[in-house]
Image (cartoon, rainbow, N blue to C red):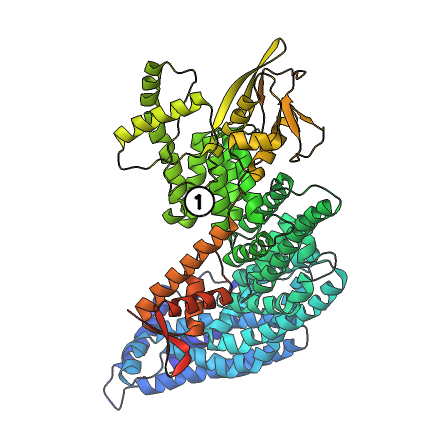
Amino acid sequence: NDEIKAKAIDRLEDILDRGINNSGRTSMFGPREYIGIYTTCYEMCTQRSPYNWSRDLYHRHGETIEKYLTTKVIPALREKTGQGGPILLNELQSRWLNHQIMNKWLKKFFTYLDRFYVKHHSLPTLHQAGLRHFRTHVYDDVKRDATGAILDLINDEREGRIIDKTLIKSIVALYEAMGMGSLDAYNADLESMLLESTRQYYSSKREEWIASDSTPDYLIKAEAALETERNRVNEYLNRSSEGKVLRVVEEEILQSVQMVLLEKEGSGCRALLANDKSEDLRRMHRLFARLENGLVPMASIVQGFISSMGNDCINKRQARLNDGEKEKADDPKFVKSLIALHEKYLGVVRDEFCGNSLFQKALKDAFVEIINKDIGQFSNAELMSTFCDRVLKSGGEKLTDDEVEKSLDRIVQLFSYLTDKDLFAEIYRNQLAKRLLNQRSASDDAEKIMIAKLKVQCGTHFTSKMEGMLGDLVVGDEQNREFESKMKEQKANLDFSVQVLTTGFWPTYKSPEVALSPDMSKCMDFFKQWHDRKHAQRKLTWIFSLGTATVRASFGKKTYDLLVTTLQAVALAQLNGGVTMGFEELAEKLNLEENILKPLMHSLSCGKHKVITKSPASNKVNLTDKFTANSKFTSNMRKIRIPMANLEASHNKHRVEEDRSTAIEAAIVRIMKARKTLAHQQLVAEVLAQLAFFKPNPRTIKKRIEALIEREYLERRSDNNNAYNYLA
């Protein structure tokens, strides 16, 4: 024992006290010295009892470390405690390094003891015993002061002062080592205090920043603080602390003042949206995304802001109407303002808010509110459909193919928010029919693209009739070529062609039985004979109101080609050669009712191109008026299109309501057939969920249920009037 003490322990303590660098030795123990000490220990541990010294050596190992710590280390640390945090930490760092060296060499000297005696008696290893002594005698005594010193240094760094990060890192390693393989000591003695200190520091900073800074400036500081804290943990704290520290900072500088920041006058979320502050919005989204449900209030503000911007567009349209602007279904300015608004905030959601689903829902809910807010005589469904008509027909918007497709894309995006999709479909189908039948469609490809986009949005059922209309024209072209060759054989006085349409695909039209000229009647009879031979099972119905004609007219020495409807052409033929006729006489000869003849004659005598003279002259057609060809008519154009007011409305509201009633009843029967019995409220909810193209009033659904009960598809349950049974 004395030999080991003299040769090993005393020398080791002396070297540590003087400092390794000041001891004058390049190595603490040479190979010969080490082997000599190791051999002595080995011989003491391998003797037979009672000469085996293993137990005494194990205890002597502990006593040696304990004595050194209590007589040398503790007094030195207590002396430094009142001299400032960095001095204490430097001393603790030095003493901890010395202890690690002592523990290492003692373990080497007593390796045989560690390998056999300790293992056999299930005792703590020499290394573990050394750490436990340091924890009991040094760490527990100094940890409070050391933790306080570390926290002071961290707060100094937060205030911009330079500190010794390596020193703190080495002391943090000491806290980790004191856990004996776990982080219990680090968590309990340093991390918990660090989190509380961090909370107090940022609570103070929050009050300072919120009082003086705008929301963007505050968030810049908040983001910098979070980044600094992350770097601090990575530089000299344990990595496990990162999430906890950042959570505390987020709670103090973001969560506790979230609504104050979002609603701050002049710089909150609404102000940033209004002023297009993209970078600030990105930062706001980035930071509040860190909080649980942190984006919910922000998304709510975004939705409200977009709704208010949409209402501004609606109010501007209302103001124009109030100022006396004529109301019509064609309002491209309004539709373009909605498209621009949607495009702008779709970009904001995609770029500034990273396409987050909450903001996508906010955009959708805002536009559902905007798009379904109708003002004036024409619904938004009609305005949007008319805008499509303007884009797709020749002579409308002057756009390239790419611009046409972009416009259609954007209008379909707005259409997706429309509740009354069936109303849009009805109006669009009517306008499509006019474009196709009057050869006013700018591009067949564009028409197909639009129908394809609607099909993707709503399914095949929604566009099947429109696709059928295009199909009719393709088949009709082939038939027309065949019929034209037959007509040439007849040597008729007219260029005559017929477009055959399938009744189910096309809108229903008024079909006045107008008295045609002999040449027209002859051509019609020939076509009917030819068609009946080819398609004996089909029935032809003539729709003269949809026909077009080119009439060669001579006024004085000038000749013009008048592009008119079939009805206008028949009326012009009656007045050919300078004949004068009264309204009622003309009505009798043409076999037309007053409500059809009035707009017809108005187009010829009161429009831009007055090819017919009306007496007395006025802008209104009366039953007592007389008409004759205008011999003084002149125009700079050789081809003149004379438009006529539509005899049909843009859509048949009664038909839309009928289709809706049918769809509601079909949904009710489908649901009840599957469920057999169902309560009223549940049935209404399921019907609303199934109907994709419109949203009926629950009262309407109730009426359809009553109608189905009358027709014995359903019955009320005998035990519950608010529930129904399905009758097979």
Q: Is residue 338 above or below residue 3?
A: above
Tell me residue 381's x, y (percent).
55, 48
Q: Is residue 181 visible?
A: yes
The reply, left or right, for residue 725 in relation to residue 596 is left
> Which residue, as the protein is rendered here, is positioned at the far bottom?
50
Graded by Cα atoms within 10 Å as few (under 14), some (14 to 19) or many (20 or more), the crowding at tag 1 reads: many
For disc 1, the marked residue is: 454
Q: Is residue 656 above or below residue 46?
A: above
Tell me residue 423's x, y (percent).
50, 50
Q: Is residue 5 visible?
A: no
**Quarter of the image containing the N terminus?**
bottom left
Residue 684: quarter of image:
bottom left
Tell me residue 13's x, y (percent).
49, 74
SS for callout 1: helix
Q: Amino acid at mark 1?
A: Leu
Q: Nearer the viewer, residue 645 or 725?
A: 645
Q: Nearer the viewer, residue 153 or 343?
A: 343
